Image (cartoon, rainbow, N blue to C red):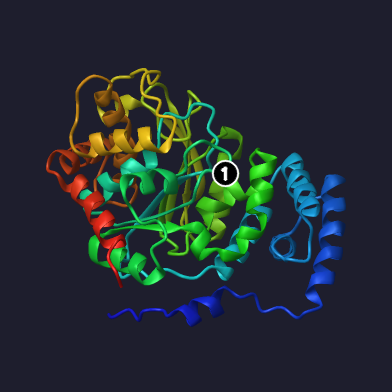
Amino acid sequence: MKLERADSKEIEGALRPNRPSAFGEIADLKLSETTARLMHRENLSRAEAANFLECLLNPAVTDAQIAAALTSLAVNGETVDELAGMAEAMRNRAFPVRSRHKVFIDTAGTGSSSAKAFNVSTAAAFVIAGAGLPVAKHGSRAATSRCGSADVLQALGVNTAAPPEIVERCLNDHEICFIFAPLFHRATARVAQVRRELGVQTIFNLLGPLTNPARPPFQILGASHRSVSETIASALTRLGVTKAWVVHGGDGLDEITIADRTFVAAASVDRGVETFAISPEDFGLERQSLTEIKAIGPIENAQLIRAIVSGEKRGNFAVARDLVIVNAAAALCLAGIAGDLQCAASLARESIDSGNAASKLDALIRETNRSQ
């Protein structure tokens, strides 16, 4: 099957909202009405939530209106219908990434974890791809944290602004790609500055991992708070995901941790949402402290990730390596590449030690920096 390349006009057309000129005034009115409802602790239906997103992204509304709406929604607490409705609307606005692979995964998180170690899911993506499971990594720059996936990948040498045709080629030919959210969700630029100025989590932190334009059938999604895990998992089932794990570490990590147990809200198209806990012992590992492996900025994160995928095991690198291994292993097990978590952990180690994980990183750097 040959995928046609999209030209710039096609992309522009796909990203341009089809709305009448009067929609600006209507959006202003509807956003004010909806914000008032949210302030009175009312919840939105799935359809109302989709319309709420359209109003938020309209150029006619002011930053103050957007801030009030997002804050009201956050205080009210996002429901499954609100998440699913807004995610569906964002997906429909996005420029799609077309995958030849039937089985592939995304590893992402909501950000702003109170116990952030480093960009674990980004490192795990290369290990997963090196083990034979394609990864469509969707992410952006940091909005409410110090280092987002785009920040660390750029520091590693990846061209995060690669156009859609190169992103598709990376996924289809090299089993690893990075989908830079602002390029595929152009309309969300309308709220980006407001989010930065608010400096707190909003529903867009939750929407990011739910709106991958490649629509992967499998996901490992890190939640910064356990309280939202089941809500996110329920939204994923309504969005048609085959299987997903929404994970939150007992130590506050928005990843699977090796310092404590990890809470899992498992979403499945067949079984709905189930909850359980896993521990490092399930992967054949002992519990280890993560206090010594914090990487703050993009450069530190990049250096740590490069060392891990290159097989470095000395000192604190061994702990960081194990953290990446358990997160990669969960993905491999979820997608059926391995039968259990211990076998999956062995595959993840082999991906690193064979050089496959580093090769996937090198391929992504090389291919995204090639001229079209």
Residue at x 21% of width, y 46% of height: 357
109 to 367, vertically: above or below? above
For the view shown, which residue lies furthest in the left direction? 354
Q: Give the side of residue 287 with respect to residue 187, left or right.
A: left
List the residue tagged with mark 1.
143
Residue 290 x, y percent position in the rendering = 38, 21
Amino acid residing under circle 1? Ala
285 to 222, vertically: above or below? above
The answer to whether any part of residue 220 appears in the image is no
167 to 317, vertically: above or below? below
Residue 277 x, y percent position in the rendering = 44, 31
Q: Nearer the viewer, residue 342 or 255?
A: 255
Q: Nearer the viewer, residue 40 or 270?
A: 40
Residue 146 x, y percent position in the rendering = 51, 36
Q: Quadrant of the N terminus?
A: bottom left
133 to 298, vertically: above or below? below
Residue 113 x, y percent position in the rendering = 53, 32
Q: Give the side of residue 183 with respect to residue 365, left or right.
A: right
Residue at x 79% of width, y 71% of height: 24
Location of residue 143 (image quadrant):
top right
Q: Quadrant of the C terminus?
A: bottom left
